[in-house]
Amino acid sequence: MEDLAEKTVEVADRDILEVCLGLEHVADIVELLNEQEIEEQAHVLVHLPDERAIEVLDQPGLDDPAALIEALPAERALKLMAGMSSDRVADVFRYMDDPPRTDLLNRLDPETRASLDRLLSYPEDTAGALMTTEFVSVPSSWTVEQTLDHIRRVERTRETIYSVYVLDPKTRQLLKAVALRRLITADPKSSVLTAARFDKPITVAPTADREEVARLIAKYDLLAVPVVDDSMHVIGICTFDDIIDAIVAEGTEDAQKFGGMEALDDPYDQIGFWSMIKKRAGWLSVLLLGEMLTASAMQFFEGELEKAVVLTLFIPLIMSSGGNSGSQATSLLIRALALSEVKLKDWWRVALRELPTGVVLGAILGLIGIVRIVVWQKAGFYDYGPHWALLALTIGCALTAIVTFGSLTGSMLPFILKKVGFDPASASAPLVATLVDVTGLVIYFTVALVILRGTLL
Amino acid sequence: MEDLAEKTVEVADRDILEVCLGLEHVADIVELLNEQEIEEQAHVLVHLPDERAIEVLDQPGLDDPAALIEALPAERALKLMAGMSSDRVADVFRYMDDPPRTDLLNRLDPETRASLDRLLSYPEDTAGALMTTEFVSVPSSWTVEQTLDHIRRVERTRETIYSVYVLDPKTRQLLKAVALRRLITADPKSSVLTAARFDKPITVAPTADREEVARLIAKYDLLAVPVVDDSMHVIGICTFDDIIDAIVAEGTEDAQKFGGMEALDDPYDQIGFWSMIKKRAGWLSVLLLGEMLTASAMQFFEGELEKAVVLTLFIPLIMSSGGNSGSQATSLLIRALALSEVKLKDWWRVALRELPTGVVLGAILGLIGIVRIVVWQKAGFYDYGPHWALLALTIGCALTAIVTFGSLTGSMLPFILKKVGFDPASASAPLVATLVDVTGLVIYFTVALVILRGTLL
């Protein structure tokens, strides 16, 4: 890939077509095209043979297929779209701007148009939006041989032929799913149903989230999962390669949300400056407003602060420890919930586990905090005053309490979000830190008031 | 899945075998077994037919296959392992405790033992450790028909038959990869080579990281990628289902690391209490030691703090804003690097982009901070003293500077880690926050000294 990138820099613009024509794998052509301006991409596509151009447009790795198709002559665009897989064409229309969009839609043949309208009616990131309508289905009255002959005839126009869907000849309801590997080893004269391994095929509803599709594909090691409507008619299939892309995209979204921002919909190097600001400023502002409560909390303890400025020295350290332990617990539980390792109803088991975990972690940090103060005092690095021992005790106890509180809050936040209908992955490290900061300050000053009353305070 | 979980609770122990025998999909049996004790799991497995038991052990979803095999009678264990896929057997031995481990290893037949030793020699999470040795390969001198006949014969013992590897008849070097869909539509009498689509097959080295394997499979939409040694001999294949599992596991590891802890190797509900403490306490302690620098920084500004206690009110707010913007930038760049959207050499382009982004984000937050102080002062919620306007200016400028610094630090940290040979995903939200906190304090007090000298300070 490094080689390819360097090659791109070296070639002059007019040579790109030549390089693309010479490349064997369409994924490599796409990688090269992604580094070019749209006009240059269109120039290359116009000169590629139809079959190749369709393959290029079918690649999910292509950054902006909508813009590329808009840049092509309309006749060619229509011809190429007719050859593309239906899920991909739907994707393209989803992102196309309006003047060319309606124009192109109206010029599609009625059949393509109907299938497209259906795909476009499903919300993004659902099975219905991910699925393709190019699958192989046969009536259950056929033999294995008839089925194989049919597969040979339609192979070129199907996204996958490795899963074949057997339908009731009358109702066209899905009866079984048959793997090609079973078909080619089965007796050619026997019924296609004999090659089916399971009674009930695994299916998914068109409204299912892509995470659910991924879970089924991974759990049952499927190449494709059929998408069926309420009356068990197959309306499309989701294939493993779409799902790999979906899992990777989901991972990126979750990582960005956990980092405390809205998920970008585009790669980092392609999103515009102001879009980026928009995605980041929202949460930063909300978190800042949340953190303003810390200022209010500190105003409340102003008297204590003025009497014992030495207490302020440890504020950042104590607050960040609470935030850090909360961030750990949140990241753990977000994943555990996403992978169904724990379920919503397990919240109290998690709480019962995070409580002692938090106490032990807090005690470890508290001990380190106490050692720090004792060493600095005894070694003469800093003088914490006559009550330094009580101060050390305050820091130790406050750290224990705050880390416990942080672990508990951090672990419960994903459950609360899920319970009220949000994605648990919306719980971000900064959000947990902010929640814990305000309470952490109150805990710190309360502990200080209890231990230091009559001496420092 | 909810249904299944409820079913588990209902059935008495002795009925589990019955439920398992009745379940169609092996993934569902595995789900049920995972909720049982190992003894109960072994009890069920002993009563399952060999073929079914092998399928159960082959499922990556099974939580602890090593313990389960240890719990079986040795004879049965050996028989089942002989039928399991080689990558899975290797996985089992990787996690088996020693008394039964050596014993079982020594009783394997020499051929299985040799292939196992090779698989075990590759480090975890590499292509070599993920691969299976059950693939289909044929000499290039064969016809399509001969190849299909061979596939029909060996189908049951191969992990996948959808990719067939064509070898040089003499050197046994890999020449081409052929898809089954091409074979069944090709002329039966022609050479198997004519069904190959590409000149050069996509291959991977046994030492390649699983992320690299996932990238290739996703990019080229492969069902399997052949693992070849230096002289182009195929030593195994990595299939898409192993890779889906690997991508999910990688996502979990990255999320946990980003949350500021060591990656757990086991599901949340299965890891022991003290293992959990170990995975979390390390980073928490390191971060606490880092945060202690904030105490040192504040000791340095002790004089200023005593003169203007009002400054301390805004410390948590200002520090957390720097951490939050850093956390955003880090999560963005970790993913962008992982997905190769940006490369190591792009660091300065990223820096040039994060700098203005940080300034704008900082200015937005700074403005909010100023408004907060003005409103509180004017509305009489709090009296910030005669120099409240200058204080507001200090907060605004400090926020702008710290958010800019946070964005820049957060975005550069993954590059630095990658440059020095670490996983960029080791950069965690808490680590960035800690880095930014110390510098943030210095920035805050420096800004305060510049703006407030002669008035408050």
Image (spheres, coloured by chain):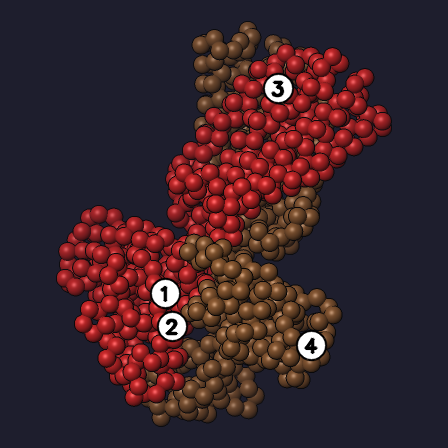
Chain colours: A brown, B red
In the picture shown, does residue A146 fall above or below A211? below
* Cα–Cα span, label 3 and label 4: 65 Å
Task: Measure how far apart labels 2 and 4 are at the Cα level.
Answer: 35 Å
State which quadrant residue B445 falls in: top right
Q: Which residue is painted at 60% across and 33% down in the image?
A: B405
Q: Residues within 10 Å of mark 2 (few under 14, many from 20)?
A: few
CB atoms of marks 4 and 1 within 8 Å: no
Q: Chain of mark 3?
A: A
- The residue beneath circle 2 is B198
Q: What's the amino acid at mark 2?
A: Phe
Pointers 2 and 1 in contact (CB under 8 A)? yes
Circles 3 and 4: CB distance less than 8 Å?
no
Q: Which residue is mark 1?
A: B202
Mark 3 vs mark 2, foreground winner is: 2
Q: Report the Cα–Cα distance between label 2 and label 1.
A: 9 Å
- Residues indicated by labels 2 and 4 sit on the same polypeptide chain: no
Both labels 4 and 1 in a single chain:
no
Percent position of residue B198, x then y: 38, 72
In the displayed orientation, state which residue is furthest to the top. A386
- Which kind of residue does numbered mark 4 sit on? Leu
Mark 3 Cα within 10 Å, few/some/many (few <14, many 20+)?
Answer: many
Looking at the image, do the residues carrying marks 2 and 4 touch, with CB atoms under 8 Å apart? no
Residue wearing tag 3: A312
**Mark whose residue sits in front, 2 or 1:** 2
Which class describes the residues within 10 Å of circle 1: few (<14), some (14-19), or many (20+)?
some
- Seen at 35% across and 71% down, the residue is B199
Mark 3: secondary structure: helix
Which residue is at a point 45% across and 29% down the rendered structure image?
A: B285
Task: Report which quarter residue A317 is drawn in.
Answer: top right
Asked whether the residues under marks 3 and 1 belong to the same chain, the reply is no
